[in-house]
């Protein structure tokens, strides 16, 4: 009998001790920032068991939030009328590649070439040609930067950034300008697209793998006694020969000279001539890129200052990305002036935010996620950028604005490079509210920039590191 009492007492003691231990553990867990059982019970109260909650859950588990949050009352705001529009031609398609920056830059030049030389609407400059040299130049940029920083340890942030980003298909307008100035242009029918220029991921991964291997070899060579810059450059050139071969096999080899039949808007042949790529560029698209300036709206940094991003360039002997940071009220009037003068602009934004993909319409009220989720999403542009919630992701060609009777913008339109069936006839339309919140960069010709703002471009730029999150290349 005593044994039973003792056993029972021990059992109660063990259960009690276990409960105390669990309680102590839960308290410690909460003290350390973990989720305790008490916290879990409190959180569960936020999700009700009403018929409404059950119905909402049944709907939401089988549907994407964007589909359910679509604000049908907002559909009436969409229309395609614009008071001022630069007439564009056939819409291009970058396919499964991150070359929006190149398509956008070439589309600006293409529209001018068609207009000034009476070319057919389907005329295009070869993206494959320029992309070949973009990839070759980026490979050289990585290899030479690896040599330049060979004395830094492998865990240095700059070295880590280089090996993390040896090459890519994204970019920005400075790359367009530097590549064209150096290599010229050719028509698309002289060097057409290939599977691998339209679908860049596989070849980019192979080239990146090879470059990382080469980068390690260059670092090992640089540490050897008696190593000379001449030997390093010779090895780098040998390595670039391998990259050239990989590109030629998958993109085709760029022509040094070609014969081309020029046709007019009616499709009639008006001239047959032989050109080098530089000669073709000089005749059909000659542009003084020194008179083009990038302005940006980044509310996390001081306005009216010039910023430059280290290693954010396509060509080693070219220019880093440089821009003047301005408030939106200074940027919009310059864009309007350019459109009124029938001049398209390179433009970039956070394209996926509040985009109705069916209509190609971007507006802050397209989706009511707050009502759907029973909460609020209240960050402003500065807060979104600071917390990595927003940043420039895609480049397009700004071509139209709709102004009210007082000359204030109501909405804008960009020509996209996702094919003619995407959005509204290949274009995306955005309200001015959306433009202010998610537009980041635009490239303007000098003549559309007021003198007081143009003078600010002369200041010494503030250098920013290549890994700054605001400056990922557009894709």
Image (tube, rainbow, N blue to C red):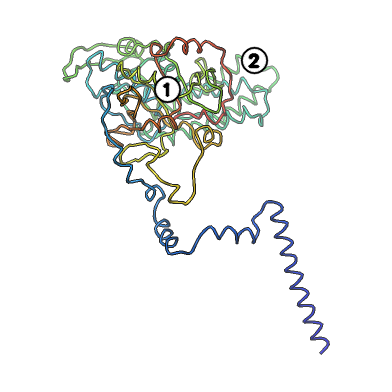
Q: Which residue is at a point 61% across and 31% down the rendered structure image? A: 160
* Quadrant in which residue 248 is drawn: top left
Label 1 with label 2: CB-CB less than 8 Å: no
Label 2 SS: loop
Spatial CA distance of label 1 from label 2 is 43 Å
* Quadrant in which residue 251 is drawn: top left
Residue 379 in the image: x percent, y percent?
51, 38
Label 1 SS: strand
Residue sticking out furthest to the bottom: 1
Q: Which residue is mark 2?
A: 228
Task: Please tell me whether residue 109 is drawn above or below residue 171 in the rendered image.
Answer: above
Residue 71 in the image: x percent, y percent?
35, 45
Q: Earlier in the sequence, mark 1 or mark 2?
A: 2
Residue 364 in the image: x percent, y percent?
40, 38
The reply to whether residue 134 is in sight is no
Viewer-closest of 43 and 444: 43
Which mark is on residue 442? 1
The reply to whether residue 216 is in sight is yes
Q: Classify mark 1: residues with Cα within 10 Å, few (<14), some (14-19) or many (20+).
A: many
Q: Which residue is at a point 44% across and 9% down the rendered structure image? A: 451
Viewer-closest of 60 and 251: 60
Q: Which residue is at a point 60% across and 14% down the rendered structure image? A: 230
Viewer-closest of 453 and 313: 453
Residue sticking out furthest to the right: 2
Q: Classify mark 2: residues with Cα within 10 Å, few (<14), some (14-19) or many (20+).
A: few
Viewer-closest of 153 and 265: 265
Q: Which residue is at a point 52% across and 10% down the rendered structure image? A: 458
Q: Quadrant of the C terminus?
A: top left
Residue 238 in the image: x percent, y percent?
52, 21
In the image, which is nearer the foreground, mark 1 or mark 2?
1
Name the side, left or right, on which 139 lies relative to 403: right
């Amino acid at each position: 009998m005593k044994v039973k009492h003792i056993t029972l007492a021990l059992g109660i003691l063990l259960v009690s001790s276990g409960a105390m231990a669990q309680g102590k553990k839960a308290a410690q867990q909460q003290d350390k920032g973990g989720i305790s059982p008490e916290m879990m019970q409190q959180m569960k109260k936020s999700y009700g068991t009403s018929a409404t909650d059950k119905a909402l859950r049944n709907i939401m588990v089988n549907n994407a939030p964007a589909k359910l949050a679509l604000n049908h009352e907002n559909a009436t705001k969409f229309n395609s009328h614009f008071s001022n529009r630069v007439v564009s031609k056939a819409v291009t398609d970058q396919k499964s590649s991150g070359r929006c920056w190149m398509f956008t830059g070439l589309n600006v030049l293409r529209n001018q070439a068609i207009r000034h030389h009476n070319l057919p609407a389907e005329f295009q400059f070869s993206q494959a040609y320029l992309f070949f040299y973009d990839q070759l130049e980026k490979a050289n940029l990585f290899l030479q930067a690896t040599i330049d920083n060979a004395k830094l340890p492998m865990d240095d942030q700059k070295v880590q950034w280089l090996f993390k980003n040896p090459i890519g298909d994204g970019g920005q307008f400075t790359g367009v300008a530097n590549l064209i100035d150096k290599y010229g242009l050719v028509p698309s029918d002289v060097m057409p697209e290939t599977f691998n220029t339209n679908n860049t991921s596989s070849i980019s991964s192979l080239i990146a793998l090879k470059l990382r291997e080469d980068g390690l070899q260059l670092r090992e060579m640089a540490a050897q006694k008696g190593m000379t810059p001449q030997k390093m450059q010779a090895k780098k050139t040998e390595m670039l020969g391998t990259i050239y071969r990989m590109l030629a096999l998958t993109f085709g080899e760029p022509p040094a000279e070609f014969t081309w039949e020029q046709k007019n808007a009616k499709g009639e042949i008006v001239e047959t001539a032989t050109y080098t790529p530089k000669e073709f560029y000089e005749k059909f698209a000659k542009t003084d890129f020194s008179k083009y300036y990038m302005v940006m709206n980044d509310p996390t940094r001081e306005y009216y200052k010039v910023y430059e991003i280290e290693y954010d360039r396509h060509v080693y002997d070219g220019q880093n990305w440089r821009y003047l940071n301005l408030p939106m009220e200074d940027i919009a009037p310059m864009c309007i002036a350019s459109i009124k003068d029938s001049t398209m602009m390179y433009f970039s934004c956070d394209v996926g935010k509040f985009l109705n993909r069916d209509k190609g319409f971007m507006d802050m009220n397209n989706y009511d996620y707050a009502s759907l989720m029973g909460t609020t999403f209240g960050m402003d542009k500065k807060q979104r950028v600071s917390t990595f919630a927003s940043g420039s992701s895609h480049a397009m060609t700004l071509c139209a604005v709709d102004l009210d009777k007082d000359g204030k913008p109501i909405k804008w339109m960009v020509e996209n490079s996702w094919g003619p069936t995407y959005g509204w006839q290949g274009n995306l339309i955005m309200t001015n509210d959306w433009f202010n919140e998610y537009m980041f960069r635009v490239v303007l010709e000098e003549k559309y920039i007021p003198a007081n703002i143009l003078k600010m471009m002369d200041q010494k730029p503030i250098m920013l590191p290549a890994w700054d999150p605001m400056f990922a290349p557009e894709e």
